[in-house]
Every structure is written in C-alpha cells, then in structure tokens.
Image: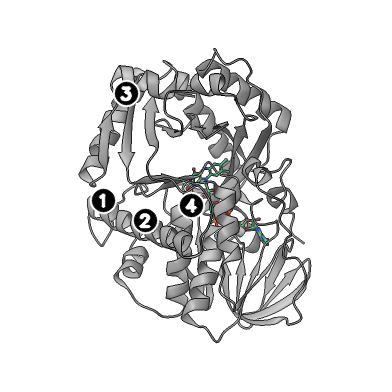
Amino acid sequence: MLNIKHLTQYNTRSGWNALLPPRVPCDQKPAKTRFASIVIGAGYTGLAAARRSAELEPAKEVLVLEASEIGEGPSGRNSGFVSVVPSKPMANAYGSAEDDALRKLRISLAGQEWLRSLIQEHNIDCDWDEESLRISAAATPKGAVDARNWLQSLRTWGFTCRVLSDEDRVAGLGTDYYTTAFDFRPRALVQPAALIRGLAASLPANVTLLERTLVTRVEGTGPFQVQSTKGTFTADRLFIANNAQARDLGMLPDRTVTILTYAALTPPLDGRELAKLGAAPIWGMTPIDSMGMTMRKLKDRFLVRSMSSYGRETDPKTVRNELTRLYRNRYPRMNSHAFEYVWGGSMAFTGNGGFFFGEARPNVFGAVGCNATGVVRGTINGKLLAELACRSQSQLLTDRLRQVGPNWLPPEPFRGIGAMSRMAWLRHKAGREY
Ligand SMILES: Cc1cc2nc3c(=O)[nH]c(=O)nc-3n(C[C@H](O)[C@H](O)[C@H](O)COP(=O)(O)OP(=O)(O)OC[C@H]3O[C@@H](n4cnc5c(N)ncnc54)[C@H](O)[C@@H]3O)c2cc1C
C-alpha cells in the first residue's frame, strides 16, 4: 500500500476553490469497471488527455480517477499565470538550444490557443484575462542583470516587451520594493480553480470522472488492473497524469522530486486599501528570481505566492507567518496584512528542467514534471499524449517527442539532501528578491 495520502490531501483548502460556489464531487462508483483507457489524475494534464482521447476515439470509454476533488488539486491551487515561455532550452540531436526554444514556444502557444478555444466553446467562467498588466520584476542589482538577459531572450522569441519607467513601476505596483519591471505578452491570467472546474464539467460524454478515488496500485501488462480506494478498474491503456505523485506508482522513480510551494489570499479589500496596491485595477507579477514572490492584484483581493519545501507540507501557521512577513515588507502601508486563505500545493521538478513525455512501457503513457508552469504545459502535454496513444500524427507531436527528458537523480537520502541544499542556497542567494 502506498503512503501518498499526505500529498493528495492538503492541510488547508485552495483559496481559489473556496471562493467558488460549493460543488458536488463526482464520487459515485460507476456501474462498469472495464474501460478502454484509464487516466490517473484530473489536473490539466489528465483532463486534457481524457478529453483528447475521447474525441479521437468517440466509441471508446475513458475513466478518470482523481484522489482529491476537482479544484482542490494543484491545478486549482496555483497562481493562475498562463505562461507560454519556453522552459529551459536544451540543445540535442535535433538542433540547437535556440531550435528547442522555438519548438517549445510553438507547442505552448498551441496549448494556450486550445485552452482559449475550450473556454469560449464551453463558456467557462474563469476570469481569463489577456489584457491586464502582467509583469516580471526584480529588486536587486543582480536581479536587474538577470531581467535584462531575460528580456533579450523574450524579444528573440518574438514576445512583445515593454520596460516600465521608474514612475510607472511604482505607480503600477504601488510599491518601490522593485527596481526593474517589464510587461511581456502573450501571457494570460486566470482563476485556476474555476478553469479546472470548467474543464472537468465540459468533458465529452464518453469520459467518466471519479473523484475522491486514490489509485493505490497498478498491475498487469495490458489489460491493466488499477486498484483504487473505490475498487479495481480494468483498461487496455493507461495515462499517468498525477505529476508529483507519479513516482509513487512506479513512474520515473529516479527522475523527479516533489516540491511544494505556498499561496495566500487576503479578505476582500476596500477601495482605499486596493489603491495602495497600485493604480491598475488588476495586475499580475512573477519574480525574475526563482525564489521570489509572485503577486496578483485581483478585483477585490490580493494574492501572494512564495516559499518552497521538499516532499512534505510546511504547517499552515509557519506558512501564514512567513507570507505575511513577505507581504508586509513589500506593502508596509496596508492597514492589515491578514490573509483569509493560506494553502500549499505540490509540483514535480526535474534536475535538468526536462519533462517526461511518452510511452513509458507498452500502452502506459505519461506526462510528468511540468515544474511550476503546468497550466499550459500540462494541457498541451495531455493533449499530445492522447494523440500519441491514438497514433495520430502531427508536427507538434513530433516536436514534443524531440525534447530532452529528465535526467537521473540519486536515490534518497542523497536526493533530498541535494534538493534541500539547493533550495537553501538559492534562497540565500536571492537576498532581497525572496
Ligand atoms: C501555489 C502554486 C502556484 C503555482 N503557480 C502556477 C502558475 O501561476 N502557472 C502555472 O502554469 N503553474 C503554476 N503552478 C504549477 C501548476 O499548478 C502545476 O504545474 C500543474 O497543476 C500541473 O498539472 P498536472 O495536471 O500535470 O498535475 P496536478 O495538477 O498536480 O494534477 C495531478 C492530480 O493527480 C491527483 N493524484 C495524485 N496521485 C493520485 C493517485 N494515486 N490517484 C488518483 N489521483 C492522484 C492529484 O490529486 C492531482 O489532482 C503552481 C503550483 C502551485 C502549488
């Protein structure tokens, strides 16, 4: 039996999900137990794989098993930045690092386009926003150098970038904490729990979603017996889409680490308090430094995201205290730095920034390790994974198969010691960016 309860059930609810009306989870065991495909995990990756395979094979039934509830997994816990920026470009047998970056960009843009079209087609009410200010910022001289390099890469890849003047930066963000900031596009903002709920609610009719169902074991070589807390289900094909927990099912046991990060939402703020958070009514900011703080000014609240931990969740009181301190440092003039919701979520990270994508063994398909940008990457990886499984060919799929995968990581305790030492070093190096 696997000990994965602590990673699919969190200490606290997702603040995004708590803001939405109550939802009744689909947790009634279906009458049938035999399916053409089973998808493990109902995040962006799993739902995209389920949707696309159901579209390509309309006569076949797909079952999606989700340990938690839609909106309570990491897909409903993130900061809601819909980013298409290429992940770390890597040269390989198919071309230079620059070729790799452009291939990754095309794939992510296709993912964003698909998400946009699904939102329109199914009227998903998720505050999808491609207009508001979406900036990257740095607070130190080293951060300013990194920002300049980053800006140059973004421009090379065709992003539209605008560096904010000192005046615009301070007025826009409502703080002089940062010394460099630029807006770049395309990049969207979204209410992530509303998005994942909408994606789940609009799955094709030949997809069955079963929530509150933890997969504990997979047996067989096809058909596969998938043991879960709601009994055993059988399928000819499997999609492993449970990201940070894929390792627990034997997928890439030596390629990923589980890192958690944390977010918090204030209570509703009045007009005077909102004005202290910058002139723009809505904005989003991601840090140049990987250990920095993400922030979003929403219509009536403020969101922060920062901190990381290895493998297990930090207790909510410690998280609340630390996020409050970081918020206060940036906005000392707020009347209150209280949060209404504080939560954490897990992600699968790899050593070299490469994601696993493909057929791990016959009829077992996986897309794992989106690092911290799974809204678009999970979506497009899930879609392309279904196309790979259904033997549908495209240039995007060929390009996706040409990316470098994750490298080997040493076993525990060395893996954990290495990951924690690296995080401590990055945190120290970040200084005021943290
Ligand atoms: C606080 C925070 C902020 C973030 N901000 C951003 C952001 O702004 N933009 C962005 O792109 N990304 C962001 N991310 C990362 C993003 O959330 C992930 O990359 C994304 O959720 C990955 O999608 P996925 O479908 O691959 O995996 P997940 O969303 O992790 O989905 C996997 C699902 O599998 C389920 N599961 C696990 N084990 C089992 C099992 N044994 N049986 C059944 N089900 C199982 C889990 O409950 C989970 O719902 C953030 C993450 C966090 C935590």
Query: Badges 2 and 1: C-beta atoms under 8 Å apart?
Result: no
Q: Earlier in the sequence, mark 2 or mark 4?
A: 2
Report the amino acid beneath label 1. Ala
Report the amino acid beneath label 2. Ser
Q: CA distance from mark 3 to mark 2?
A: 27 Å
Q: Is residue 173 visible?
A: yes
Q: Is residue 365 visible?
A: no
Report the amino acid beneath label 3. Ala
Classify residue 348 as left or right of residue 11. left
* Residue 71 position (above or below residue 420): below
Classify residue 1 as left or right of residue 54. right
- Nearest to the observer: residue 81 or residue 314: 81
What SS does tag 1 mark?
helix
The residue where tag 4 is placed is: 375
Occupied quadrant, residue 311? top right
The residue where tag 3 is placed is: 144
Q: Residue at x 35, y 60 (%)?
A: 110
Q: Residue at x 71, y 32 (%)?
A: 316
The residue where tag 2 is placed is: 108
- Neighbor class of circle 4 (other Cα within 10 Å; few <14, some 14-19, many 20+) is many
The residue where tag 1 is placed is: 97
Percent position (x, y) of residue 304? 55, 31
Residue 168's disc is none
Report the amino acid beneath label 4. Val
Occupied quadrant, residue 64? bottom right
Q: Nearer the viewer, mark 4 or mark 3?
A: 4
